[in-house]
Structures are given as C-alpha cells and as structure tokens.
Image: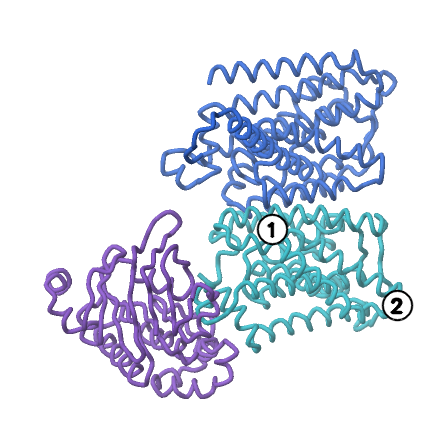
Amino acid sequence: MKRRRMLSLALLALAAIVLGCAPLVITKDSSISLLILVLLYVTMASSWNVLGGYTGQSNLGHAAFFGIGSLVTRLLWIGGWPFAAALAAGGCAAIVLAALIGIPAFKLRGVYFAIGTLALAQILNVTVGNLLPEMSYNPAIAGYELLPRYYLFLALALVTVGAAHFLVNSRFGLGMKAVREQEDAAESLGVSGLKHKLLALLVSALFAGLAGGAFAYYHVSYYLNMTFSPLWTFDPMMMAYVGGAGTIVGPIVGSVFFVVVKELLVLNVGEYHLMIFGTLFILTVLFLPGGLVEAWQRLRRLSLRVLASRKTDPLPQGGS
Amino acid sequence: MLESVSQTLVFGILVGALYGLVALGLSLVFGVTKFLNVAHGELLMFGGYASFWAVSLLGLDPFLTIPTTILALLAVGVILYKLLFARMVKLPEETKIKNTLLVGFGLSVILQNLALRFWTADDRGITAAYSSQALTILGVRFPLVRLISLGTALVFLLALHLFLRKTYTGKAIRATVQDWEAATLMGIDIHKVYLLAFALGAALAGVAGTLVAVNYSIEPSMGLNWTLKALIVMVMGGLGSITGTLVGGLALGLTESATSLLLSNNYREVVGLVLFLLILVFRPQGLFGAKEN
Amino acid sequence: MLSLESIDVFYDDLQALWGVSLQVEEGELVALVGPNGAGKTTVLRAISGLLAPAGGRITFGGLDLARVAAHKIVDQGISQVPESGRIFAGMTVLENLELGAFSAEARKSKDRSLEWVFEIFPRMQERMSQRAGTLSGGERQMLAIGRALMSKPKLLMLDEPSFGLAPILVAHTFEMVKKINQEGVSILLVEQNVRAALELADRAYLLENGRIVGQGAGDDLLNYESVRSAYLA
C-alpha cells in the first residue's frame, strides 16, 4: 500500500511539473484556454466522482455548488475584496450550502435523492436568474493575464485529485465504498451511512465551489446564473462515468476524452460531441460500468494472457 | 380585485389541466415499470416539434395534428424501450433504479442535441387561426386555445382511465402493477405490459407537447423544466391514480397562478420546485411509497 | 402427465433443490409435504416457469417446459394458486376472476368458466363487485382458487391453501380441493398440514431440505415411521 501511495504521489508531482512547465512550450492563448477547460472539467468531474462514483449517490445538483462558489467569489471580488479571500469565501459558501441541505437531502434514497438535488439546483438557477439577471463585467479587464488563471486551475485540479485520492484510500474511503455497495449492510456493521455521505458531499461541494470561484476569476463577462446551469452537473457526470466512475483516474481520462472529442468534431461538423458523448455514456452504463478505465484494464489482462500463453512450454495445460 | 382573483383562478385551472396531462405519461411509466424516465420532457419536446412540423407542412389545425404526433411518439417509445430499457428489467431493484435513471438522463442529452441539430435553438410556437380569441364570461377571459387544451387534456385523462378500467389489456396493466409474478401466473406477458406502458407514456408526452407548443413555445432545451413539472405534479397528487394526477396538476397550476398574483411572475417556477422539495423531504412514507403495498 | 426428472434449482449461488423427481398422473391428487423451508414453493415456481432449473427436465404431457415462457405455462393447462393467494387487492372480485381467464384461449370460454367457479364458490358471486382487498382471509383464498380455475386447467397446483385459515375453513378448503379433483382436474397440493394432506391425497411426496426423502400412497406415508415422529407427534 505504501508503495502505491508513493507511486501515486510521484505521478501527481510529475503531472504538476509537466503541466507547470507547459506554458513555456505552448504559447498560443487559445491552447492555454483549452488546457484550462480540461483542468476545470477534471476538477468538476473528480469532485462529482467523490460523492457520485465512490459513495454511489447520484448527485444531480452538483451545479449548485459550482454556481454558489462562482457567485460569491465574483460578487466579492468585483466588490473590492482581494481575489484569494473571495475565492476562499466562495469555497466556504459551497460548504455551507452542502451542510445545510445535506441532512434533509440524505433522508432521500436513490432516485429521490437524485431528483431532489436536481430540483434544488434548478431553484437556485431560476432564483439567481431572477434576482441578478444582468451580465457581470470585470472592471479590471485592462490588466487581465491568462497565465495566473492557468496556474490557479492547475493547482485546483491537482489538489482536487490529490484530496480525492487521499480520501478514497483512507479508512473513510473504505466506508464510502461500503455505503455505495450495500448501505444497509454497512450500517449493520457500524458504518454510519449518513456521516460518510455527508463528508463526501462536503468534499465534493468544496472543490466544485472553488472551481466556480476560479471560473469567476477566469471569465471576463458572463451571466451570473450561467454557472448554475444543469450542464455543469451533467457534463462532469458523463465524463466521470465514461472515464470510469469510482476510480481516481477515470474522471481525468473522461475529461480529456470529452475535450478532445469536442475539439475534433467542432473542426468538422459542429455540435455533435454531446450526442456522441451521451451515447458513450449510455453504452458505459449498460455495458461497461467501469468506463474507459475498465476497458483499459480488460485489454491489459487480455494481452497479458496472450503473452503468457505464448511463453509456456508445449506441455498439456490444465484449466486457466 | 375580485376579477383578478377569478382570472387567476381560471388561469390556474386551465394551466393545471395541461400540467396533469404532462405528468400522466410519466406517472403511467413509473407506476408500471418503476422506471423514472427523466427524458420525459424531451419526449414532450419531440411531440411539440412533430406537431409544429405537421402544422407547417400540412397546414392542419394544431389540435388535429395530435393523431400524427401520437403515432410518431408511439413508434419512438417502442424503439427506445426495446433498445435501452428492456435489458434493464431483469436487474436487481437498486441497480435497476439507478441505471434507468442514468440511461434516461443520457437519453435526454442525446435527444436535446438531436433537436438542436435538426431544428436549431430558435423558439417555435404554433399559432392557430383563433389564437388570440377568447370567451369572456362575467369579466373573466377564457382564451380559446386554453379552453380547447383543457378539453383535450380531460379527454386523454378520461381515455386512459377508461382504458385501464374497462379493457382486458388495461386490467392486465393494473394487475402487473400490483403483483407482477401473480400476473405472470395468469398468463400476462409482463414484458409486453412494460413495453405498452412505456410507449403509451411517450405518446401521452407527445400530446402534452402539442399542447405546450400551442399554448407556449418549444425549443430544444425545454425538456428538463417540463420533466420537473411532471415530477412536481406526481408528488402533489400522489401516485397510483389518474384522478390524483389531475388533482396534482390543478394544485400546481393554481399555486403558480396565485404566486404570479401575490408575488411576481418570476417566481412561478420556483414555488413549484420548493413545494416539491418540501413534500419530498417531509412526507413520511416517501414519494411514491403509498398506494399498493 | 406432469413429470419432474431430477431437477436442480438454484437461487443465485444457493442450491435449493437437489435431483427432485415427481410425477402427477391424470386425475390424481398428489400431495407434496415437508417442513418449512424444504423447498416446496420452489418446486411450484420451477413448474410455473418463474424459476429455471439448472439441471433435469420438467415435462407436461410430453412437452419439455424449458421451452415454454413463464406466461405461456397457463396456456399449457397448468395453473397455480400461489402462497397466500396473491389476489389483486386493488381490483374487484370479478376483475380478478376475469384476469384468471386472461389468455386468449381461456377468454373464449370465460362466461362458462365463470359459471363453473360460481358453482363451486357461490360466495364469490355474491361479492362480485367488491374490491378484493376487503374480503376476509377465507374468501381471499376462495377467490385465489377460483381465479386459478378460470383458465380451465388440466393441472391445478396449490401452495399451502390452508395457511392462516381458521380450522373450520381449513376443512372447507380441503373439501373444495377434493371436489375440484373429482370434476377431473389433476391436483398438486403443497401443504404443511401433513395429516390433512395425506388423508386427502392419492399419493404423496415428502420433501426435506430440497430432496425427496419419501413417497407413496397417502395412507402408507401416514404410517411411515419418520413421518409420524417428525410431523404427527
């Protein structure tokens, strides 16, 4: 176990270094923006995955946390706060929201939790749209620099993935997975379903909220209720699933895949990427619940088996 | 003052009946198959477009396009069921519920983007020759289109009721809802029952879509809002009866109308959702636990 | 007529039946007795197609039932009264009976079947329009049996029809079963009430822990040592 953890940390550090140095090599603003998009999705998909993939609670209201984080951060920042403080406040707002709705929300099981969170996110979406319908402009547009934004998103993605990895491999993570598999059985063994779901929700919400804050920092002008759009739940969710829900690598793979597919298609024929991704999503749910990660593992096992059978001497073999 | 209250009441009822019809298809599917088809709103949207194009290309009166919309959506329902949902019937309860939710959701994404591709993001509406006409009784306006929509909704509610009560197939459906194993012992093919329920649910969504297209407008991303409306109605009216769905629809319609009058038009949407959440959380037996068991 | 040849049945990974073999000939009244949890209901479910045997064969009139879908078993002439009746509580007595004759064949002779059932269970005719959920326990059992008869079965299977009934109703139920058998319907009766079942039956099988451990004519089994000590002491 310790070796695995050292390996994962090493990988994370490597990613940090590679991506950190990327701007030295990549100079086009549009390419940096693309990387930012990937990092944003990685953060959103990984944070969703903590509650959705590992703890098995289909949270259809993830956008609410993204939205509230971005709203609070944006308003405070434009109102004069230093950005770091505004970002922290955005993250806190997301945690507070999660704490408020957590206990009543988890009274609902399965489907009802899903549609309940969906309804909640829509309530916020509509209300914010009503109360603050105007576009939000960034007054400090003159001094806008892309690179700080890039590093913010990079840091956020690394921290989110790292935190998820740490949480999942802890004893707490074991409880989360137990809740996902068989909540009642877990309860009878003394694993508090509610505690695990709540913590997973808080972690999930925190990183979505911070992502929202980063979004507020990144976009020059946008409609304030845009970050409450259900797209910010559905896209990350699909990415997590197609990549491999319930794994650390899955959301990353899914996010990259999503953006790659989108870019490839936009070059050719327009908005097909969501249709294709939706289809992949359904295929994943129906046939390959472990997503691309599982596909990869199966491929590896298959090729290993092929290799192994070639190496053995020509004596009669028993079963596999 | 009295006039605006009566007007509010009337609008609430007219809209409420439409809401009842919107929820009817979803309620039927959920009751029979236990699938919560979150792509219901997208099926409604397709129904609206089917009628829109029938009107544009054939010049029919909007309400006369209902039969073609029904046929189109029946076909769509059958295809979707056989392709996607049929294979999930045999799964254990919890997995089944979760997977059908996810698949339904993926379906809604696909359908939304298909519609976007085919018909662009522009709002479309159907206007009938009489769209601006209204009956005025005692100072209260009854827009003609709304009245006919009310009539249509009631017709379909009644039709489904009679179908379930009086026909052998309808009784088979009710039996399957109550005890599918016992139903199998009677010779009822529950796979056919599920297929029928799903197809009918889609067709009813389609009809509701026509009414929405005539009374409001349609565009590819409208699905989610209408699915939520259907869910709110189901929660308010209780599952298991057609009367309940109508009552739920009327309750939602009147609540929205009252909110418009007392607060502001902007909060119509939100009130329903808030009530929905409150009922979800505080009703002790949970959402649809009540009727049979 | 009905023949189970060494069937094995599993619930997921758990084996419930081991090499169970039994026969019901035309016109016979056969009892399947045994303690709670022996697997008697499992046998009926396998015959009705709700469970697929992992090994062995079930044939009816020579036809291998493995090829027949669960909802088509009724068409073959096998009808089951499941444990506790499982009537459709939200529907009327009449609707329940009508559903018993759901299959296309049975629907043609629905009215005659209805007459027949009302003859055997006049109480059902009185309560025709009543919601089945409001019937008493004994009436529900009657309705369940009547419903199963609506398809004019060649073989009627009953899963513990006396369960939960007052003693006088139990006797009545068994009378009815005998009467139905005398009208030409073969019967496979699963019962925990061993004495009554053995007195009623032409032949009986004893099922314990998923295995047939004894069989013979009803009277013989009544005298069989282990049966006496285990069930009749």
Quadrant the C terminus of chain C occupies: bottom left
Q: Label 2 belongs to which residue?
A: B58
Residue B90 appears left or right of A60:
left
Q: State which chain disc 1 sits on.
A: B
Q: Can residue A202 be seen in this view?
A: no
Residue at 80%, 70% in the rendered image = B63
Q: Residue C98 appears at what percent x and percent y?
A: 47, 79
Residue B161 lies, in percent from the top left, at 60, 72
Q: Which of A81 and C139 is in front in this view?
A: C139
Query: Residue C79, relative to residue B262: is it above or below?
Result: below
Q: Residue A45 carries which label?
A: none
In depth, the one of C3 and A280 nearer the eye is C3
Q: Which of marks 2 and 1 is nearer the N terminus?
A: 2
Q: In which quarter of the image is residue B70?
A: bottom right
For the residues carrying marks 2 and 1, which lies nearer the camera in this image? 2
Chain identifier of the residue bearing label 2 in the image? B
Label the purple chain with its letter: C
Q: How crowded is mark 1: few (under 14 residues within 10 Å), some or many (20 or more)?
A: many
Q: Is mark 1 on a helix, strand or loop?
A: helix
Residue A135 in which image quadrant: top right
Secondary structure of the residue carrying numbered label 2: helix
Task: Tell me the amino acid under the disc marked 2.
Answer: Leu
From the image, state the color of chain A: blue
User: What amino acid type should be assigned to the residue bearing mark 1?
Assistant: Phe
Residue B12 point in image, percent of width and height? 71, 62
Q: How far apart are marks 2 and 1 (CA)?
A: 40 Å
Could you tell me if residue B174 is visible in this image? yes
Please report the residue visible at 48 percent of the width from the left and 75 percent of the height from the top: C99
Q: Which mark is residue B276?
A: 1
Quadrant of the rendered image containing residue A113: top right
Please name the color used to draw chain B: cyan
